[in-house]
Image: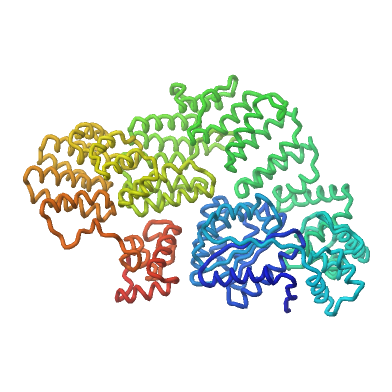
Amino acid sequence: MAMEPLRGRSAELGRLLEAMRAADQGAASLTVVSGEPGIGKSALVHAAVEQAERHGFLVATAAAHQTDNISPLSSLAPALRASKDPLIGTEHFLELAALNTQPLWLAERLADLIGQRLAGTSALVVLDDAQWSDPLTGFVLRVLISRLAETQVMWLLATRPSPGGVTDQIVDALGDQLPVHHIQLTPLDSEAVLQIAADRLNQPVDAALTVRLGSAQGVPFLVEQVVAGLYLADGSAEGPLPDGLVEGVRRRVAGTTELCRSLLRTAAVFGSEFRLSDVAALMGEGVARLAEPLDEAIRAGLLADSGAHLTFRHELLRAAVLADVPPSAQRALHSAIADQLLLTEQGASAAAPHILATAAVGDLASISTLRVAARDLLTTMSITAMSVIQETFELTPADHPLRGEVGADVVEILLVARQYDAAQAFANDLLGGTPLYQGPVTPELTARVRLLLAPQEWAVGALDAARLTVAGAPQPLADRLSAYRVLADAAEPFETEDPVAAAVLQLAHAEQAAAEGRFADAAAAYAAARGQRASASAVNAPGSEVGTPPAVRVELAELFCLAQAGEPITALRRVTEGLPGDSWLAPQLAALRAQLELAVGNLPAASEAAKASLRWSAEFHDPSAEPTARQVLALVALLQGDLAAARKVPDEPVRALLAMADGDTTAAERLLATPLDHPIRLELLLHAATHLPGTGQAAADLLADHAPAGAQLVAAANKRDLIAVAQAVEHLRSSQRPLLVAAAEELHGRVELEHGDRSTGIAALERALDSYTQLGATAFAVPVQAVLQAAGVRRRRWSAVQARPESGWEALTPMERKVALLVADGHTNRSAAEELVLSASTVGTHLRNVFSKLDVNSRVQLTRLVLQRFASPPNA
């Protein structure tokens, strides 16, 4: 059936078509269409969809509903699956369900899948009524639009004005990553109004109707309802629900059977979308008996049947029907709906909105159900769970003993929802004798709330020993608080049988060992803390885990210490092979990976991981990992010779290296103060000993505990013991830190050259130069090259100072070449990631760089180029 012509919106449609043409040419963009209910947003969206389909675009559409906030990704899912040419295959879509509790991993996986699907394809992705999007959809869209900024996609969101809502959050998160267009719809002029009416009537508009149409005030939806008789001209169009619409719908409904009227009123309380079986059960009628009343409602222009669900044709029509349902009847229906949902598989979370619509303060049965609902929602819809538990708290009388328990639930759920400041503030009010809670603040309640907060306070370095003493707390909780006081360095270790307290004490031991530079001991203690934590988690008693240290954060600390103890490759392998994943800690995980990649000399991967950490930090509004990520970026930039970029980060060792690059050789002494937890501290100490006479003994002393062979090398160099120097270098060659080995070769070569063994010295310096060059450490390579040139060494090409081309095959980094060859050999991003021990997202980033440098825009073109360069695409 042909669409009705779009009247009065030619300029707006033209802007959409312009964005669509740009997408077809490779310029992705986001367009936000906003306006009040009934102003014609959906009609404009439908016109854009029709045009996109005519031009061969892949089109994916969805519309959010008011009830979406109880089901993760429910708003976006239809756009992924329900189209003629789905964005996501069935197998992959089912796989995504397991990631609902890990929003970033879900979004990244979706970005990979959709990116593969859209390679070289122009697409339009639409979400109507975006203001009702579930929280997970809002987050995933922020990530997807950002990640797919280089694809041929036009994103289109239609929304009611909602300051600070989903669309505003998406636009704010995108920054300047791609163009964002705003289209604000305003009332139509009189000519467009008359054209819409004539279209609906299929004949010219008479004078009487022309007068009545004036009351619609240019709102397209009301124009259509005037024509349909559902809006009366004598009513006001002002306010959220026009009086004329209520009266018009009332008259239309009055002409239907009693069973139809009952169906409509019951459905209006259910919501804008509902199942006929639910309404039938609530009405006590068989579904077959409602077939005729349903047909009446559809013919009356009020309901639409999509097959799986029934919907009101417009939210304003539902509101108009609901306006004729007395408040007492609405409350009774909400209560009955809640009871019915609790008896079905939909459960407490689906019933929660209806319970909240009717529950009164002190309704203990409702409070109990809502606490269950909040728990049910917590794993997948933490933002909704947070709203439910906060409203539950308000329903609990201020002086009731249950108020404290619900208050503790609020703190816990706020923490899970990553609302740390709000959780701390609420806890202070709850325990501080404010009007928020007038019941007794028992030692058990105080201890429990303090233990809920303690793990996060440890993670951000904000443990306050003064808050960790609660007189009269039950023994297990008291032991845990005491253990956290040990962790805060305010008490001495003690013996305990409580597994949570034991885990915290092991954590305290690990922190102390790390602070003293005993990294092997620290790594072992962190591992022991994780083991104790697992014992605590195995206990299923209520409250058995309160205060348990966060497992992933503990493991991150363990792996960093493992790397500092001389096993960075081992630590990196554990990260890449699947560290237990909490996607909320993605910024910290990426920052650790950046440090580990730097330690093993993989500078491009270190930079990429650091940039990912910064990107995810911005998406989660969590700046805690930013200093580490920026430090790695500065170090990589400096090593690669980009001194301008390195100067942007106030890292003291970087400043010392920059001073050395500027000719201040004495700055090498400042490297001796490199902190114990610096990712390349050992390399910098050896660098200092190499480039500034007189620092050797100090450097040797500092290296002794963490790199004995390095200490022996420096000491031997100071004594000019050439045999010992060579032996120490040989020992260091087994190190997992290639930059350290290269630095050792450099020191060896310089010492040998100074003492007249030109052959041995030049060979060692050339090994150092080759290593630095292969690693991309231009800043360290250039001085070695200068020494060799001064010694009369001639090469056809000194690669250390060669700039990488900006385009073509030679512009690709070694990892980009591997990705290109694997993709040309038929690998997907995922299989290539498995082959290279990378994430699929990282492979996608490399592939986009390959496309850009080789000036191709599809895998087919890449394969052709590789075939032209090689007889057949070799395996990487």
Q: Is residue 363 left or right of residue 771?
A: right
Residue 3 lies, in percent from the top left, at: 73, 76
Which of the 4 image quarters holds residue 297?
Answer: bottom right
- Judge by depth and name the residue closer to the eye, 627 or 249: 627
When the figure is inspected, residue 624 is found, relative to residue 503, above or below; the finding is: below
Residue 753 lies, in percent from the top left, at: 10, 46
Q: Residue furthest top?
A: 471
Q: Residue at x 21, y 34 (%)?
A: 695
Q: Residue at x 68, y 67 (%)?
A: 45
- Judge by depth and name the residue closer to the eye, 393 or 765: 765
Which of the 4 image quarters holds residue 735?
Answer: top left
Q: Residue at x 31, y 70 (%)?
A: 874
- Judge by depth and name the residue closer to the eye, 304 or 133: 133
> Does any portion of residue 106 appear in the rendered image?
no
Q: Is residue 82 left or right of residue 774?
A: right
> Does any portion of residue 855 appear in the rendered image?
yes
When the figure is inspected, residue 710 is found, relative to residue 288, above or below; the finding is: above
Which part of the image, by quadrant, shows the N terminus?
bottom right
- Judge by depth and name the residue closer to the eye, 224 or 364: 224
Q: Is residue 425 left or right of residue 695?
A: right
Q: Residue at x 37, y 40 (%)?
A: 651
Which of the 4 image quarters holds residue 826?
Answer: bottom left
Residue 352 lies, in percent from the top left, at: 73, 47
When the figure is inspected, residue 576 is found, relative to residue 292, above or below; the finding is: above
